[in-house]
Amino acid sequence: MTVLQDRQGRTFPYLRLSVTDLCNFRCNYCLPDGCQDHHHGDALTLPEIRRLVTAFARLGTEKIRLTGGEPSLRRDFTDIIHTIKSVPGIRKVAVTTNGYKLPQRIDGWLDAGLDALNLSVDSLDPRTFQAITGHDRLQEILTGMQKAFERGLTGAKVNAVLMRGLNDGDLDRYLDWIKVQPVSVRFIELMETGDHREFFQQHHVSGTVIREQLVARGWTEVIRLADAGPAQEFCHPDYQGRIGLIMPYSPDFCRQCNRLRVSATGQLQLCLFADGGYDLRPLLQSDDDLEALVADIRRQLNFKQDGHFLEHGYTGTTRQLAQIGG
């Protein structure tokens, strides 16, 4: 096995794989008018996904995060989990989901081999949650998470996009919740995308605001694992849960980048905010092309940049985050 490495010496044990760009929520920071432009019907097939993941596993990737859009909109989503978990070398399969119908679906996902669950919960206040997402489903999502806990799932995280004037004052509510819940809450800085420049300018707030509050209350930073996401994670001895901060506008954010992305139609995207992707799909049609696929992925890593250019207002071809799962 050859470890996948770029020119900067960064290694990539972590792949974020979008299985659809369709979403059924209307989050105001992503799809305020709903999902009107998608390629759901042309998403990678199950055999294509198996070949893709097999190639990445041969290059040292051990963790696959399934994203969307909303990945559970795939009718074969449970089969996708099972297929990926069966690939030699894949140690962890995770999903990022909006939690739609989670109480009815979580058993099937866990039975298929799901190891970790990330839920988008942008507020613990039902009214604010509905205002942000367009759905009154907060309790459904939390019920599904509790069911996952009862099944023994330990890898549970909650993602909340931090937005000025909407949920930036909710820290105490989350802290009260994780006092007794073994959940890691990730506050993600609002990122500028091509379709939401005005919204970004109105609602962006730095994650350092939360960081300063945590440090003042005795929270300490946790050492980051090799296959972890980009969050700076904090713990406190009096709390069962943790707080994570994802701050893409901070200096050196990309220095420890350990993840690559593949879109629902097979485009390898070296950065969330790159100028498009590289089409891997022609080499996903036959098991006989596996060695060529491995070589092609390795070759593309030569083009990965040192970092993004978000701080200069450059968002690449990313119009909204549902394109490739954030």
Image: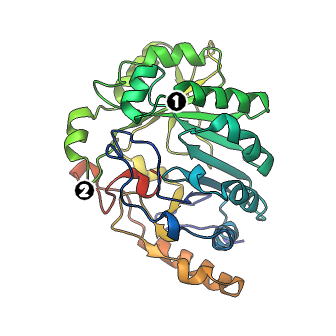
Q: Quadrant of residue 49?
A: bottom right
| Foreground: disc 2 or disc 1 | 1
Above or below 108: residue 215: above
Question: Which sits in the foreground, 244 or 181?
Answer: 181
Question: Which sits in the foreground, 306 or 137?
Answer: 137
The circle on residue 270 is: none
Which residue does the numbered mark 1 point to in the structure image? 137
Residue at the (36%, 28%) spot, across then down: 131
Q: Quadrant of residue 117?
A: top right
Q: Local crowd at mark 1 within 10 Å, few (<14), some, or many (≥20)?
A: some
Q: How many marks?
A: 2
The circle on residue 314 is: 2
Q: Secondary structure at mark 2?
A: loop
Query: 47 left or right of 175?
Result: right
Query: 54 left or right of 217?
Result: right
Residue at the (57%, 38%) spot, across then down: 99
Picture coordinates of residue 17, whole percent (x, y): 56, 59
Above or below 263: residue 36: above
Picture coordinates of residue 133, whole percent (x, y): 41, 35
Q: Where, quadrant-wise, is the N terminus in this rendering?
A: bottom right
Picture coordinates of residue 27, whole percent (x, y): 38, 39
Residue at the (78%, 65%) spot, across then down: 88
Picture coordinates of residue 45, whole percent (x, y): 62, 70
> The residue under label 1 is which amino acid type?
Arg
Residue at far bottom of view: 288
Colour mapping = rainbow
Q: Is residue 294 visible?
A: yes
How many angstroms separate mark 2 from mark 1 (CA)? Answer: 34 Å
Residue at the (57%, 52%) spot, across then down: 73
Q: Is residue 215 visible?
A: no
Lower sequence index among marks 2 and 1: 1
> The residue under label 2 is which amino acid type?
Tyr
